[in-house]
Image: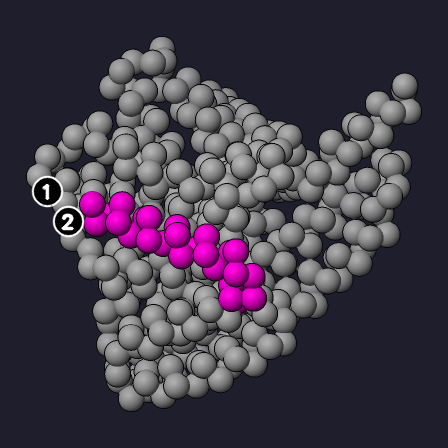
Amino acid sequence: MSFYSDLRFFLVLAAALVPAAVLGLRERSLKGYSFALSLLFIWLVYGGQPAQLLWLAGFYLLELHAVKGYLLLRRKFGRNSVIYGHFVALALAPLLLYKFSGLFGKSVFGFLGISYLSFKVLQVIIEIYDGVIKEMGGLELSSFLLFFPAISSGPIDRSRRFLADWHTVYSREEYRKLLGTGLQKIALGLFYKYALSQLFYQVMGRFAHRYRPLPLAGYGYSYGFYLFFDFAGYSLMAIGVSYILGIHTPENFDKPFLSVDMKDFWNRWHITLSHWFRDFLFSRFMMNAIRKKWFSSRLNGAAAGLVVNMLVMGLWHGLTVDYILYGLYHGVLLAATEVYQKKSKIYKNNKKKTWYKVVSWFVTFHLVMFGFFVFSGKFTEVIQVALLKLM
């Protein structure tokens, strides 16, 4: 069994959501039932691969104690940056071990969803340091980390937003709306993932081993649409299931192919991840850059911060040339966009005009599609093929 990928999962899911709907419509709390379901689905999905289940259990116990330990030390020692740094390192240690050990053929902490869970833990540690989170019970933290609809591939929720919903007991009318919206999202997600994404996957296959310009373009564009419908479909199903369990898991996509510039694109694509990086990496990079005067101007600092931000995002996806190039590509594009919009009179004079928006959309769309071509691994494959021919 795997999340949102086989008939058995959907049959068990349908049966498991019926009692949730009954509880919700009877105006009962869903938090205990949703936590029990999370444990059940973790056992069903990861139990078929005992090594993954053990790594997940080890990760959970380590990070649970890290968060509880840091809460105690934060109350005792305040905003001590040395202690904070050690707990940030502890929160990231399983993910880093997983990424680097994979380069040597045997992954440590190799379980599905480690990247997303690591960012959830890191968010909690950061907000404890900031003084935003002052207390969190073990059951609350466990429910947040192990919430099964989004455990494997997001969307990445925030703990305070999640727990506000988790503690809420909805009226019958409120829950009826949640239930209806959740079912609609699940249906649309199924259509995206199992109809539209598969259509574009078939198109990709026709171009997979052809290296002339037009077939490569066909592969790149079809891959971009395949990736969107596959991931957006998964996200919609995860969000829909969350709604039925009383959790407003945030949206992950908002018509990304209508973006009029690269900043707009990253406000529409994988929204929970891009906003996580914006809030917990880029903004902190900028605060330090301004305070310590790393750059001659805020614009230069913002440009550098965007490159760093997207490079780290690329590394988060994986320690491969393709992902590193993808991160750098988008970092440079975002930095160039930032400078252009701050400096260009053409932009300032025309940004609200229809013709300019159309041209900007057209350019952005093709830049985005080339980025997906890089992300797919096809770009480096083409380079390798070209080098072999030259040799």
Q: Quadrant of residue 70?
A: top left
Q: Is residue 5 above or below residue 68?
A: below
Residue at 14% x, 40% y: name it: 73
The three-letter amino acid code for the residue at tag 2 is Lys
| Left or right for 344, reference 90 | right
Q: Quadrant of residue 230?
A: bottom right
Does any portion of residue 272 appear in the rendered image? Answer: no
The residue to which callout 1 is attached is 75
Circle 2 sits in a helix, a strand or a loop, which is it?
loop
Q: Is residue 56 magenta?
A: yes
Camera-nearest residue between 91 and 388: 91
Mark 2 or mark 1, whichever is nearer to me: 1
The residue to which callout 2 is attached is 134
Q: Is residue 129 magenta?
A: no
Q: Quadrant of residue 202?
A: bottom right
Point out the image quarter for the C terminus.
top right
Q: Which sits earlier in the primary sequence, circle 2 or circle 1? A: 1
Q: Which residues are magenta?
A: 45-69
Q: How is the image coloured?
A: one colour
